[in-house]
Image (spheres, grey):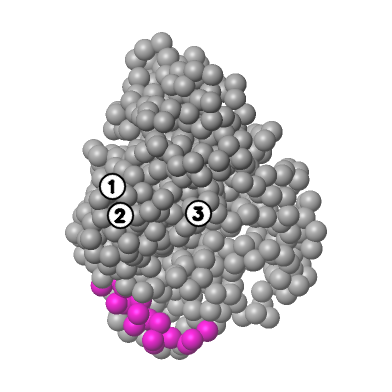
Amino acid sequence: MKKILAIIIILFVCSCDKDLLDTTPYSSVSSSNMWSSDNFTDLGVAGVYSALRLGIGNSGNTSPYELYEMDRFGFTGESRGDEPLLTGTTTAGDELYAQIWQYMYEGIQRANDAIVNIPLKSPSSAEKKARYLAECKFLRAYFYFRLNQLYKGVPIYLEPFSPDEATKARSTEEEVWNQILADLSDCVNEPNLPSRYVSGAQNYGHVSKSAVYALRGKVYLYMKKWDLAAADFAQVKAAGHTLFSDYKALFKTANEQCPEMIFSIQNISQSGFGGSTQLYCGSRSSFGSGWNYYFPSPNLVDLYENKDGSKFDWNSVIPGYSSLTEAEREVFFLRDNLTASEIAAATARGAKMSLYLPTGNEQRVRQAYLDRDPRLEANVITPYGTYLGAFNNTATPAIATMRWPYRAQAATGGDLQTDTQNYFYYLYRKFVYEGVSEIVDRNFSPTDFPIIRYGDVLLMWAEALNEQGLVAEATDKVNEVRARAGVALLNSNQATTVQGQADLRERIQNERRVEFPNEGINYFDELRWKTWKEKVFYPGAGKKQVWGTNVSDYSYKGDFLYTWPIPVSEIQMNPNLVQNPGWIN
């Protein structure tokens, strides 16, 4: 179905007015005959789905807009570039805010076109039209959901509009939530929308009721309607969704349609229809090469518990570690058998070389990453761990080891090469392809990108139960996720004993942080929990190398940063838009 959908989208692009695909919120509606046949109806709906792909980058530019890339603003991720939102230099005129706004409204515009015109013009069967209307209402709800997460109150347009008609004032955050709920409730009540699609189904990739319930439950979380959220999440389970047994294998192309996946962006290895994770999260040792533009933060790595559920502590692996300065700690990450010039360079950077072990340094630090929550090694390439890549951008598979300082790739026994060789960062393993056969072109990742999966639902369900005081029931949901991961269950020993609602709230938040790196979830979570300031802008915060030394400092300018600014360009076009407090036009 994925290949069929891509072909439909290509045909859709060729058969519509060019302006329909402009990445502005005011693009033209489709040509007059777009909905006039059953085939054109299919093409038009495919075009609504294709709006999910707006902002996905390619090798010609570095895209900061694809969903997973939002992790760079959260607790779990970092970016190779200095991000104005984090360094305190951001303004309401930054392109980031304008582009996300425009992409989401482009999706809304396409959905509105379908919702209005399918009943008026399409000759398709009544059942098919009803299903398509529900799908497009879900997509409209999703685009408004993304906008409301960030801007907290935006104009609501429920019909196609021209640039001259784009003059509405902002609705309140609550009014937008209520409109989203109205669309999603219409989807729930649509009998022609199936409960879910199983792997290989002809319409796999289309919206199902399980996706509707999952998104509506998430909206209820934002509105703190915990009982309604829990009820919707229970419906997702009732539809037959389950956790996939192998966490690491879950993110492989072969398992992209497993019962854990609820709604995903469909990817294939073709220009314009693949993902960009390999391009921006791979390395120079990956097949086809990569830029490692986004990577995990040391905060995330240190958060992964020991396998027995106890908190990880560097001092238990390397006594005295925490008493050293961050610069001094570099010594523990140095490779064995350093050259004289490498020793001199490390000394100049501040490494405490008196603690260096010439032939055992690698083994000592490697112990810090062993016997940990298995999700650590599934998500992150850690120092002196290995990665099956390709030698020197060829079709020759090669196992590379992540060493510091970097020397060279090799067909056997070489170092893992990055695009940031002067710094030592953790690297993503999740969604980064292994060997030479999993991907055809680094620009077009074929694995579907999950927008909602059952692991997410379980932990949101746990949160909704816990906030109602149902601690035992919430603990059971968390333990389903932990059991699949292979880490000790809550309440299984002294370290994992839940001490009540507040303790479980923190445990659920940490569980989400370690479960979803590189999935575009953490930043939105931190905003929703109002934890972003404390988790990301703590004293000494910044973009860090693995031992904690800042490469750039973060600077928090005020709580207004919790809400994105209305783009200056939009205010200039629509004088009825009022800027969010704290931001200057």
- Quick one: 419 or 160, which is closer to the camera? 419
In this rendered view, identify the residue nearer to me: 62 or 10: 62
> Residue drawn 67% across and 44% down?
553
Q: In terms of secondary structure, where does tag 1 sit?
A: loop
Q: Residues within 10 Å of mark 3 (few under 14, many from 20)?
A: some
Residue at 25% in and 50% down: 412
> SS for tag 2?
loop
Residue 449, given in percent of the width and then of the height, sits at 37, 56
Residue ID for mark 2: 410
> In terms of sequence position, does the residue under pointer 3 or pointer 1 come before the other?
1
CA gap, disc 2 and disc 3: 18 Å
Q: Any mark on residue 439, and which? A: none
Instruction: Check if mark 2's residue and mark 1's residue have beta carbons within 8 Å.
Output: yes
Write the start and end of the magenta stretch as one range: 4-19
Whether residue 7 appears in magenta in the rendering, the answer is yes
Q: Amino acid at mark 3?
A: Thr
The quarter holding residue 370 reads: top left
**In front of the other: 303 or 488:** 303
Q: Is residue 262 left or right of residue 227?
A: left
Q: Are marks 2 and 3 in contact (CB under 8 Å)?
A: no
Where residue 505 appears, as percent x and y from the top left, is: 52, 26
Give me the C-alpha separation between circle 3 and circle 1. Answer: 20 Å
* Quadrant of image for the C terminus: bottom right
Residue 569 within the magenta-colored segment of the rendering:
no
On residue 420, the disc is: 3
Residue 76 at x, y = what percent? 51, 41
User: What residue do we see at 47% from left, 67% from top?
Assistant: 57
Give the residue number, with chain letter if any, for mark 1.
413
Marks 2 and 1, how far apart in space? 6 Å
Disc 2 residue crowd, few under 14, some 14–19, many 20+, Cα 10 Å: some
